[in-house]
Image: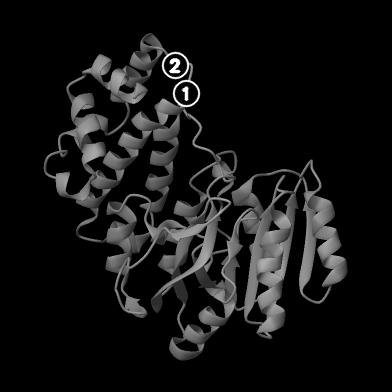
Amino acid sequence: MLFSIIIPVYNVENYLQECIDSVVNQIVNYAIDAEIVLLDDGSKDMSGKICDNNYNKYPDIIRVVHKKNEGLLSTRRKGLLLAKGEYIINCDSDDFLSENALYEIKKIIDKSHPDIVIYNMGIFDGHASKPYYQNSFTNREYIKIGKKQILKSYFIDDYPIVTTMAGKAIKATCFNLNKDYSKFYADSFGEDTLQSAEVFENAENIIYLNKVLYYDRSSSGMSAKFKEDYYDNFLQIIENVLDYPYILNNDEISSWFNVKMLNTLARSITQSKNSNSMNYKERKKYLIDLYGKKYVKEILNTLNSNRRFMSFKYWFILLIFKYKCFLLLHKILLL
């Protein structure tokens, strides 16, 4: 079997059928040797029933597992244990594949025999779709990329394509199924960053396919809720990632780490904007606490030298933060 498409499911009754159809239709139409693994993570709506209905319709293509709610990372890892395909494709249950995605991925696999295929993603707002990632590594149709290019993008780019698990077809052998991520199961973000570092450790032949093959439904995914412990949680993830020898032994990793944490710090500040009830006193306390976090003072000292790697918005916000102009920062975040 060539592909296992793993779809974790939780309370997405309004979008799940479209997701499943986007995969089933091309498996049937292009005669792709593939399976769909639907993992119902304790849904409380009709999502579980929708999974069962699709299994009854396509028992040779679809497998369904109903389980207690454990979160996205744990559910994806359970899917890996069940998968039979040579390549793993992750698809969120409120997103969907382009109509010829599996065909395009199969073509590049037959031609280049990669360990990982990275492809572009688009955004669907409920009415129209548009590319989100494009030309990340080349303007050509596809290119082989090295681990140093991967790492540079991983640490320097803000929201890089290389850290998403949805935009990849990955050889099952690139996953370390004995890897213990249990301490991260409770977190609602960061699972992509963790697992992408894992699969690149075990990959040699990596192909970037410059085509939009996956669409993220921007209106229904995780909303940008304020997380007071965002910085601490993401730092823990990055410190875990640094344990991989191919990352730790890179001669530029120290400077790239500073850029990654500067962007993380900036997001920690800007995402406080999503707390609608936060007054100045509360925001000031949050910012003062954030200022005292691990590495913050050290990475702020690299702000100017890393200016070229950052958006003006993030650089400017961190500049204000560095000099503790908290009232000005509060007013900017209210705009």
Mark 1 falls on what kind of element?
A: loop
Q: Residue at coordinates 70% horizontally, 64% vertically from top-left?
A: 20
Q: Amino acid at mark 2?
A: Met
Q: Are marks 2 and 1 in contact (CB under 8 Å)?
A: yes
Residue 179, picture quadrant: bottom right
Task: Tell me: 56 left or right of 67.
Answer: right
**Residue where numbered disc 2 is placed:** 278
Residue 56 vertical position relative to residue 125 in the rendered view, above or below: below
Label 1: how many residues lie within 10 Å, few (<14), some (14-19) or many (20+)?
Answer: some
Task: Tell me: 182 left or right of 68.
Answer: left
Q: Residue at coordinates 51% horizontally, 86% vertically from top-left?
A: 107
Q: Quadrant of the C terminus?
A: top left
Q: Position of residue 282 (x, y in %)?
A: 40, 13
Label 2: how many residues lie within 10 Å, few (<14), some (14-19) or many (20+)?
Answer: some
Q: Residue at coordinates 44% horizontally, 70% vertically from top-left?
A: 118
Q: Quadrant of the N terminus?
A: bottom right
